[in-house]
Image (spheres, coloured by chain):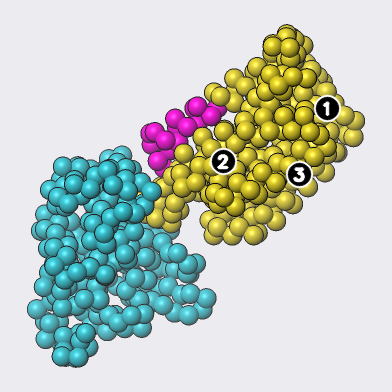
Amino acid sequence: MNLVQQLINGLILGHAYALIAIGWTVLLGVARLVNFGHGQMYMIGAFMAWWATAPLGLPYPVAVLVAVAAGALLGLLVQAVMLRLTLEQNLVSIMIVTLGFGHVLRGAASLAFGGTPQVLETPPSLIEFELAGAWITAQDLLIVAAAILVFALLRGVVERGRLGRTARMVAEDPKLAQLAGIDVTRVYLAVFAFEGAAVALAAALVAPRTPILTSIGFEEVIVTFVVVVLGGIGSVAGSYLAGVGLGLFTALFGGFVSPAYTTAASFAVLTAVLVLRPGGLAAGRAVR
Amino acid sequence: MSDVVLEARDLVVAYGGNLALDLPHLALRPGELVGVVGANGAGKSTLVNALLGWSRGTPRISGSVRLAGEEIGALPTHERVRRGLLLVPEGGPVFGRLTVAENLAAAEAAAGRRGYTEAEVFDLFPRLRERLHHAGAALSGGERQMLAIARSLRLGPRALLLDEPSIGLAPRLVSTVLRTVRRLVDAGLPVLLVEQNVRAAIEVVDRLVLLERGRILAEGPVAAMRDDPRIIEAYLGDTVA
């Protein structure tokens, strides 16, 4: 494969990474919270999209909506359960609860969907064409377009207008935000619902690239972690750039060095960036 | 009492079994500036925080809080704020990453309530207009205090609670802030002012409440309290720092 092909692959992969990570970016930036069940929520989103298309026979766009709705509900559920911990900003307990939540989701998915790998066949994934020597599908273009759209919308919302300002106030000081008349509980619930919906959207768009198993999700949470930290915690633009950058790095490293060591190499880059620039690529620009 | 704007009855606050406040009754009337004084740990901040149901810790709060005749003691903090009970906590905290303009724009009065306009708050605190595009974190202590009060005014207060607005400020600024508070009160806004600087507070308040170990030790019109030996001995005597 030549360089241009690897760059195209990297761009597609990078947008997929950015899309998978966007929920966590908002979660960390707005609520200063983490969700280690993020990977399993991705897995559930993928299964919901498959379930809506294959067994139910719904059109793919409707299946995407089903997955997004399920993701938002899951997000709301996990936040409602651990609301007290969130209000107390008890991060250690939140990590444990969300890790446990991820395992519960995996168990529930095994019961509901079984152990057979499933394939999410979508109309855009069947449309193939050649671009500069690389074979890409309409699904790949959909991923890139959706990532750009979601990031552009989010950047607009977070940086301008009431909603973003409210989010930034809660991120900076949730207690003080209460004294400004903000219902902090509602903001936290909304943020988790968004995180669930965003990762489910990512799953519904990205999952057609790989088989769907109840064991998927680990790689996605690692990728998310790298993207969010590299981009500067809470930075919308930083996450986008970090996602695309990681995708390009993975494709180039995998293509020209060895695909077996891309994760290790990614973490080496992450470590180097954090040593040189502790706040990530967008240091000092929270929720931007 | 129909002319009471804010009233607390049997307000009790405890932290992990330790009683921090036991207040049988407190009332604030329109156009009244009530000062709450007392030593460190007397329960002054606990009192104003409890009126809002707000705390950075997790206290147990019981008792009745009525605002304009409506019981609000069971409401969450943000709902009390929307009904017009505003608190400026100690240190005048502001959103440091937001500019002064954003801090002010973020404070919107709830539906049905009229907040101070930007022009009105700039009239009270002209310095804020000059610092409009500076981040909250870049403001001086006095400017932060002004911004914190201005933000509360924008939210349409029925009653305003100020927790030690003079703390950390230069004497000239203390007098500026307290005179501005007096202006607000003279315009009809009732204010409960927690203050350690008794000497400064006594110049502007109408009534004084002296707290000690979470209980009211004495209270009354400032003219009478000024001569109270407990006030003189503890706060106005030569030994006062």
Q: Which residue is mark 2?
A: A231
Residue B173, by quadrant, is bottom left
In the figure, B38 relative to A181: above or below?
below
Nearer the observer, disc 3 or disc 1?
Answer: 3
Taking the spot 83% from the left edge, 27% from the top edge, the residue there is A211
Quick check: A17 left or right of A128? left
* Position of B129 relative to A148 (above/below): below
Q: Position of residue A126 (x, y in %)?
A: 77, 11
Up the image or down, B65 lies above or below B207; here it is above
Q: Residue at x 41, y 61 (%)?
A: B54
Relative to A141, say whether A274 is above or below: below
Residue at image position (14%, 50%) is B126
Query: Mark 3 = which residue?
Result: A264
Residue corresponding to mark 1 = A211
Query: Residue B121 versus residue B169: which sits nearer the camera?
Result: B169
Image quarter (top left, top right, bottom left or bottom right) of the C terminus of chain B: bottom left
SS under mark 1: loop
Is residue A156 on the magenta stretch?
A: yes
